[in-house]
Image (spheres, rainbow, N blue to C red):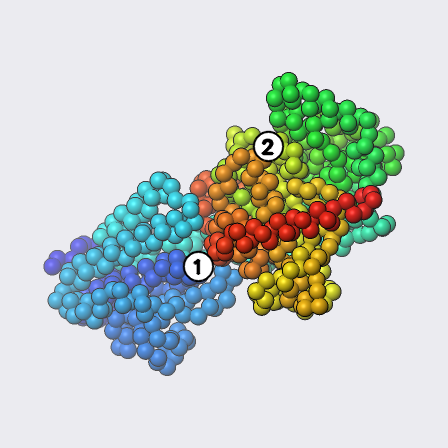
């Protein structure tokens, strides 16, 4: 067989594998390397598909050294031997060149491939075939590689199908990938590794095209940051607690300057933890808690007051007075009349308009009434208003950006999602000067860049989104009917309603999910204020020593023993809408145990979810297709399984612990071209567990109706708002 000539200056791959050996033996070893390197490369892909682990490869020099070793004939070592030259003692069935690691980089052990190797013909047979000539071995290699890549293509399809997101385009891309791999097997030197875009399991160490996204999540008492790779992997993380101030009973504030310092600290710590340099960060995205606001002087940059958080109750009296006022009742009646005449959803929403302390409106009115300097400076055009994201953008860009995004704006109570503008009706009604409001930009786009003197380095800010909307985007709830349920301090159930807002009369909020160019997505949101705080209360009163034990304790008894619990520390939100409701436990008797009470409490959280789910389903008339849960409380298997049983729907629990941050990273990366479109994001989803309906619905229906009766008894307990 004639060997193909290689132009001067180029390296012959076979020469590299057969240096310092006779020609015939060199050909045999080259062919052996072809087969074994192929198997190892493909196993790397299978390791990601079946274990979700990232694989780091050793250098070609180590691989070649082991190939030339007299101790290794096939390139795969299947017996326990003393430590090799790589310094690693291998268990049975381990691949020397592949070490499985967690996304964070810690060693996770060797990947057991015994079952995989059994599905391939004996490598000894292949070695014997190689003795007949390099050409036969090369053909054997091509056939095996084609077989393996065909299996990989099928596996990728099955993986996507399990997520319920397969499309015709993804099928075509899978076929294209298979053909591409087959072509590589036939035409390219075997020593060339599969590219990173084709095999995402390969480690980051040799990638030259890697892009990293920094995402910051600003919560009430905690700021978290993550650096993500273009494959959705966590590269590094950091967090920092921030102190919630309570200068007076019912007042909840944050120090605005300390907030900025904490965000900068988390960003730098996060990049440091990832082992990267500042210049390696491609872009940055923010996600923040909603309706926490501040006003400041546009000339001096000094705040008029601290950040007033969404829990703050200083305007509770304002809420009561305005909701009972003749002005608001007249507005409601007029809007109802217009809805009858014109049948516009905007008028229907206005007919049930009520103010709440959780929205910005009443708290901002309180500030304008109680800090006279603000109105004076506002009349001069010298006042700026903004929620957390606006304040951070203004500070971090060196005062260049006074902006927000549509998701955050729609969560203030000052925005009209039906007209897609700041509400002139609400602002006029409350005498709020519209000149203080920020400009509104797309959720994914150009929000400016950080100022190096303020932030320490320059990075483009390309996404801003509210926390719940961010979690929904991180969950890839891109289709109408997709449902996301976040269970943290409270429960937030969000439904993708498509391109039109939903006007609710049952207490659902019509919000903007995100806006990207011409794409505008609305959501309908139902809230339950008491979830995580209920679980923490269980621990604080001694029913549990560790919250993690709640699931096992609940499962230790067959039922709640007749005990029923109503979670209403903050009243009852949609669909009950009663801020005078009381937390209550019914049905206790001398035989009641801690296990019965804990089970009843967890069941009440599942019942609360069902009430929101049914409200969304009945009001919107949109078939609910896919339910995904996240949040700390959702880690309770007993709770999520009961939720699945109650609504008779499959529920996916996602692997990532901070979906809001992931959503911000997705949006930031889309703006910078890290991902070409949202379809590509589906492949980055990692589902921790899927809960299928199991129990008999008639039995659960009886329990649910019993809980509803308890809710009615707990309503209207307090004489007035508390």
Of 224 and 316, which appears nearest the observer? 316
Q: Which residue is mark 1?
A: 52
Q: Few, some or many C-alpha atoms within 10 Å of disc 1 (few <14, some 14-19, many ≥20)?
A: some
Image quarter (top left, top right, bottom left or bottom right) of the N terminus: bottom left
| 423 up-or-down from 57: above or below | above
- Tag count in the figure? 2
| 325 up-or-down from 643: above or below | above
- Residue 698 visible, this orientation: yes
In the image: residue 131, left or right of residue 259: left
Residue at the location (81% across, 32% down)?
324
Of 518 and 710, which appears nearest the observer? 710
Question: For the view shown, which residue lies furthest in the top direction?
Answer: 341
Residue at the location (56% across, 50% down)?
701
Of 596 and 488, which appears nearest the observer? 596
- Residue 264 visible, this orientation: no
Where residue 502 is drawn, which disc sits there?
2
Of tags 1 and 2, the one toward the viewer is 2
Q: CA distance from mark 1 to mark 2?
A: 38 Å
Residue at the location (73% across, 64% down)?
540
């Amino acid at each position: 067989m004639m060997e193909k000539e290689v132009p001067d200056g180029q390296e012959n791959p076979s020469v590299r594998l057969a240096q310092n050996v006779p020609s015939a033996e060199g050909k045999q070893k080259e062919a052996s390397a072809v087969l074994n390197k192929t198997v190892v490369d493909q196993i790397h892909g299978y390791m990601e598909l079946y274990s979700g682990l990232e694989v780091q490869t050793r250098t070609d020099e180590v691989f070649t050294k082991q190939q030339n070793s007299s101790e290794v004939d096939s390139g795969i070592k299947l017996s326990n031997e003393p430590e090799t030259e790589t310094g690693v003692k291998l268990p049975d069935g381990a691949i020397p060149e592949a070490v499985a690691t967690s996304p964070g980089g810690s060693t996770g052990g060797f990947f057991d491939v015994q079952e995989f190797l059994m599905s391939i013909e004996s490598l000894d047979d292949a070695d014997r075939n190689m003795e007949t000539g390099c050409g036969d071995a090369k053909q054997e290699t091509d056939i095996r590689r084609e077989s393996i890549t065909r299996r990989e293509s099928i596996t990728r399809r099955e993986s996507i199908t399990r997520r319920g997101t397969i499309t015709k385009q993804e099928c075509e891309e899978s076929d294209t990938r298979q053909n591409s791999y087959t072509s590589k097997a036939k035409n390219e030197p075997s020593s060339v590794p599969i590219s990173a875009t084709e095999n995402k399991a390969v480690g980051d160490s040799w990638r030259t095209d890697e892009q990293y996204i920094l995402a910051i999540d600003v919560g009430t008492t905690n700021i978290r940051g993550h650096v993500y790779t273009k494959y959705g992997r966590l590269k590094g993380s950091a967090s920092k607690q921030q102190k919630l101030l309570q200068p007076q009973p019912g007042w909840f504030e944050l120090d605005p300057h300390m907030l900025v310092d904490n965000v900068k600290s988390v960003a730098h710590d996060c990049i440091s933890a990832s082992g990267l340099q500042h210049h390696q960060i491609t872009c940055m995205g923010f996600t923040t808690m909603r309706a926490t606001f501040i006003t400041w002087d546009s000339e001096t940059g000094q705040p008029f007051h601290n950040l007033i958080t969404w829990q703050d109750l200083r305007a509770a009296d304002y809420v009561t007075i305005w909701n009972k006022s003749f002005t608001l009742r007249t507005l409601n009646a007029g809007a109802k009349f217009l809805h009858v005449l014109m049948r516009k959803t905007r008028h229907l929403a206005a007919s049930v308009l009520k103010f709440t302390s959780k929205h910005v409106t009443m708290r901002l009115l309180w500030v304008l009434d109680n800090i006279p300097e603000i109105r004076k400076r506002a009349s001069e055009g010298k006042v700026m208003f903004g929620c957390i994201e606006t304040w951070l953008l203004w500070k971090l860009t060196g005062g260049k950006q006074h902006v927000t995004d549509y998701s955050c704006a729609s969560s203030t109570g000052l925005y009209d999602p039906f007209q897609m503008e700041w509400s002139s009706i609400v602002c006029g009604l409350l005498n709020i000067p519209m000149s203080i409001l920020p400009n509104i930009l797309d959720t994914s786009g150009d929000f400016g860049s950080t100022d190096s003197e303020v932030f320490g380095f320059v990075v483009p800010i390309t996404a801003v989104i509210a926390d719940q909307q961010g979690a929904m985007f991180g969950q890839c709830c891109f289709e109408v009917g997709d449902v996301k349920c976040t269970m943290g301090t409270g429960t937030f159930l969000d439904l993708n309603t498509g391109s039109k807002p939903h006007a609710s009369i049952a207490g659902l909020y019509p919000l903007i999910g995100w806006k990207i160019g011409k794409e505008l997505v609305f959501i309908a949101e139902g809230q339950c204020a008491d979830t995580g705080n209920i679980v923490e209360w269980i621990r604080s009163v001694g029913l549990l020593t560790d919250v993690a034990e709640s699931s096992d304790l609940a499962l230790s008894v067959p039922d709640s023993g007749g005990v029923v619990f109503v979670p209403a520390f903050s009243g009852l939100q949609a669909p009950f809408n009663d801020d005078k409701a009381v937390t209550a436990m019914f049905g206790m008797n001398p035989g009641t145990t801690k296990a019965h009470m804990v089970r009843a409490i967890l069941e009440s959280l599942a019942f609360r979810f069902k009430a929101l789910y049914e409200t969304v389903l009945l009001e919107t008339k949109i078939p609910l297709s896919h339910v995904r849960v996240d949040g700390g409380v959702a880690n309770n298997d007993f709770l999520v399984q009961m939720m699945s049983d109650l609504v008779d729907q499959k529920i996916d629990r996602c692997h990532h612990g901070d979906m809001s941050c992931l959503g911000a990273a997705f949006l930031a990366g889309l703006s910078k071209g890290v991902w070409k479109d949202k379809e590509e994001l589906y492949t980055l989803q990692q589902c921790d567990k899927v809960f299928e309906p199991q129990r008999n619905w008639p039995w659960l229906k009886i329990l649910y109706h019993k809980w509803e009766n308890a809710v009615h008894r707990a309503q209207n307990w307090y004489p007035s708002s508390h």
